[in-house]
Amino acid sequence: MSARRVVALLALLGVFLTACERSSDDPDAAPSAPVRPAWQPVTLPPPPGPPGRLLVRDAVACADHWYVVGGVGDAAGETRPAAWTSPDGATWTSVPMRPKSYYGQRHVLYSVACRNGQVALLGAKRGGAHANPRTSSWRQLPDGSLTEVTAPFELFGGPRAVNVARLVAGTPGWLITGNRTGGAASWVSADSTRFTIVEGAPELASDGRGETWGFDAVDRDGRWLMVGGLLLTGRTDRDPLAWTSADGVTWQRVPVPATTEYDELQRVVLVDGVPVAVGLRGRAFGTWRADGDGGAWRTTAGFGTARTDGIPGVRGLTVAGSRLYAATVDGGGHALWVSADGGGSWRSVDPPVAMPGGAERAVALAGSRERLLLVVDDAAAGQVFLAPDSAS
């Protein structure tokens, strides 16, 4: 593990070492009753090929279709990529996969985005002498199948690699967020056929002010908005940070209010055209909004709990109907939350099944104008559920 990753992990562990389970707003306030959506299970058909356990990792609502992506795993640990699509959320079909490389044949797809009715994806499989992720992007062909986009190893890997986080889509094209040893980085493409890495970029990358980390992004009015954090030189706790760019190459920093504890923005979406980010705030979770034409950020509600036996994180954020939904994880497992006022306040959501945390476990969300889709993988089974946006 690189020194940069060790320092960051130790800093985060230090912040949460003394945490106790509590509400981030008012520990003495009585919690609101959980929201109980009318969850309906979704059946994903086994993809062609040898039988195995379905792995589900991410989902997106794309024009008039839903997509769920992941893979298939067997008892020996071998995997292959898989994806499913549905026009109505009820009837699902497997999407033909066209891998091109040795590792692509073993990928698990973990991030999917949609633009103009077309999807693109990220997939990875650990391998090689150091068992590092072997990552590639995937794109959709005219016949609807998904094909791996082969690329030089050091585009996503190599000695400067840290992680390849999220793929997002928007008016400028496609953007991948992630990090290199030199700080936050981006990968850009106009049509998802070829990505170009942007690392060491002024303002985006680490510099004398501190180390930067990028996690997620969204298209706001034709400009990219990336969110993440900054570990200031001489400090052990991150502050939240955002960036904007017209092309994904040249970036400008946007200050975000911080506390004296560990803060960072991990997911961002648009709610009625306004960017809303959710991430870590001190010992729990917090919300930030970029209101007004100038996009100045302000803090809003904190929510959730922190545990001493795990590192919290935000695993999903989506808008379904008129509401904002978040998925979080800590030592107690995954949890769901809903906000009816754009992140101004939150209520817990009862999930349809247990959602434990840990390795090979995942939770993801996707939303449409009327429905919420939940993806749950508990390392024993991959499951998908739909619910109307009728939180009450």
Image: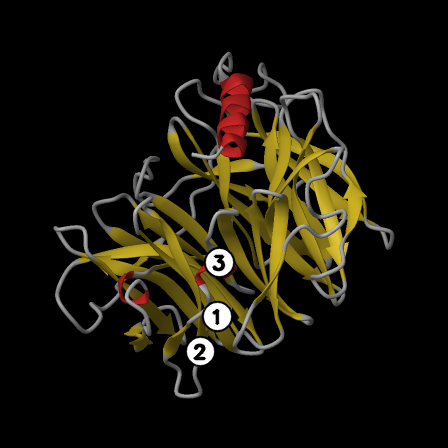
Which mark is on residue 154?
3
- Residue 377 falls left or right of residue 388: left
Identified by mark 3, the residue type is Glu
Q: Residue 386, can we see it?
A: no
Displayed quadrant of residue 191: bottom right
Q: Indicate the amino acid at tag 2.
A: Gln
Q: Secondary structure at mark 3?
A: helix
Q: How many marks?
A: 3
Residue count near mark 3 (Cα–Cα under 10 Å), binned few <14, some 14–19, many ≥20 = few
Q: In this rendered view, identify the residue nearer to me: 139 or 233.
A: 233
Q: Residue at x 76, y 64 (%)?
A: 246
Amino acid at dot 1: Ala
* Residue 282 vs residue 178, the one in the foreground: 178
Left or right, 192 with reference to 26: left
Earlier sequence position, callout 1 versus callout 2: 1
What percent of the width, then of the height, locates residue 319?
A: 58, 55
Tell me the residue that label 2 is attached to: 140
Residue 289: x %, y % from top left:
73, 44
Residue at position x 59%, y 19% from top? 29
